[in-house]
Image (spheres, grey):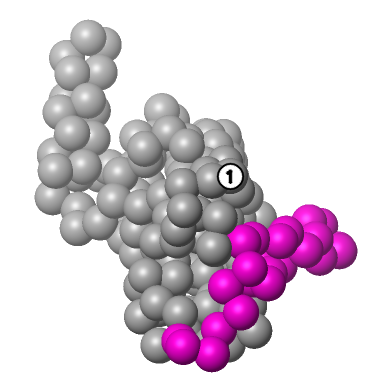
Amino acid sequence: MRKKIIIRLFAAVLLLLTEIGYSDTGNYLINPGDMLVISVWNEEALHGEMRVLPDGSISFPLVGSFIAAGKSVDEVQKIVLEKLTKYLSDPAVTISVKAVDGNTVYVIGQVGKPGNYSMIAPLNVTQALSLAGGLTTFAKANSILILRRDGESTKPINFQFGEIETGENLDSNILLKSGDVIIVP
């Protein structure tokens, strides 16, 4: 029994080291559009890459479809493990995030390069504006608006870049969340 546990642990570590992508950092929540890699040790048919669908769901053999968005990698791993135990004895499940394509913010309006930007690390408002090429000459720096989805509604957050430039109100330089839209009039 002990040898079996050691072999499974070794296999799990090997899978983690050989996978290309991001392992769970503990805090990252999966988003629609993210690419996951799920594998079950010693079960070749139970290995695959899957993109989280726009509705937040993924589908995996023997597990079926379930909502992954908004959950951590550990939470998704527990769901897969729980459902697989109906069919396999003591499955060793490994899940990693291969691409954070769903972890995106959008910057529009009077910036050098409007568009969508993937957040591969925590990103605040000024960093996102920097990625977007900074404000143009005609931008209204103290009228920037961040739109954040909150369930079914959208919450506006005012941002005054001019205050940040002078070192004031630095707490307003908030960390962005996936799906945030920064509007620079």
Q: Is residue 123 left or right of residue 149?
A: left
Q: Quadrant of the C terminus?
A: bottom right
The location of residue 184, given as percent across then percent down, is: 60, 79
* Residue that carries the numbered disc 1 in the rendered image: 169
The foreground one among 70 and 43 is: 70
Q: Is residue 27 above or below residue 132?
A: above
Task: Choose top left, top right, bottom left or bottom right for residue 143.
Answer: bottom right
Q: Is residue 155 left or right of residue 11?
A: right
Farthest front residue in view: 166
Was residue 149 drawn as part of the magenta stretch in this picture?
yes
Q: Amino acid at mark 1?
A: Asn
The foreground one among 166 and 114 is: 166
Which residues are the magenta region?
Answer: 136-160
- Residue at image location 19% in from the left, 58% down from the top: 20
- Residue at image location 50% in from the left, 60% down from the top: 125
Farthest top residue in view: 2
Label 1: element kind: loop
Task: Choose top left, top right, bottom left or bottom right for residue 141.
Answer: bottom right
